[in-house]
Amino acid sequence: MHHGITDSIEVHMSTWFMCMLLFGVLALLSRLTEVNIMDWGTPVLAVVAVAILFSMKLFQIHMEHRVNTTVNSQRAKSEWWTPWLGCHQRREAPPHSVTLRS
């Protein structure tokens, strides 16, 4: 049972570091300012989470555009060079549009 659990849960060192840093900063703010973090911390963390999700979506759109541009340019190059190389059979071309899974 122990091996099955450790194989399915893998937490990277950067994730642990960010969690410890976040909780450390929140603990210091709570102790030094004597303000309840639940009053202001939850809305701030919610806004940060939405901002991160929005930036990830923009990054996904940007990467899809880059992949599609590369695929289309490679396809155009292969179609232009194919007759000169003596390859008269057309191979299946890659799709015009690639969508990354989110």
Image: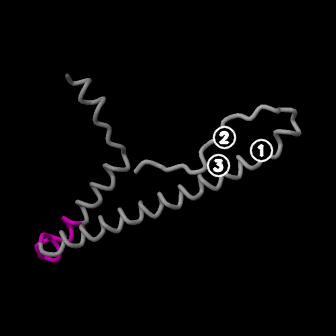
Which residue was labeled with disc 1?
79
Residue at image x 71%, y 52%? 73
4 in the magenta segment: no
| Residue 26 as seen in the image, left or right of residue 51 | left
Q: Which residues are magenta?
A: 26-38
36 in the magenta segment: yes
Label 1, label 2: how many angstroms apart (C-alpha)? 9 Å
Cβ atoms under marks 3 and 1 closer than 8 Å: no
Which residue was labeled with disc 2?
93
Q: Earlier in the sequence, mark 3 or mark 1?
A: 3
| Residue 43 as seen in the image, left or right of residue 16 | left
Which residue was labeled with disc 3?
71
Residue at image x 12%, y 70%? 38
In the rendered image, the vertical position of residue 14 relative to residue 2, given as above or below: below
In the rendered image, the vertical position of residue 19 relative to residue 13, given as above or below: below
Cβ atoms under marks 1 and 2 closer than 8 Å: yes
User: To which quarter of the image does residue 31 belong?
Assistant: bottom left
Residue at image x 24%, y 72%? 44
- In-front residue for pair 45/82: 82
Q: For residue 64, which numbered disc appears in the image?
A: none
Residue at image x 82%, y 33%? 88
- What is the magenta segment's predominant secondary structure? helix
Please state which of the two labelled residues, at mark 3 or mark 1, is closer to the viewer: 1
Q: Residues within 10 Å of mark 3 (few under 14, many from 20)?
A: some
Please state which of the two labelled residues, at mark 3 or mark 2, is closer to the viewer: 2
Residue type marked 1: Glu
Q: Secondary structure at mark 1?
A: helix
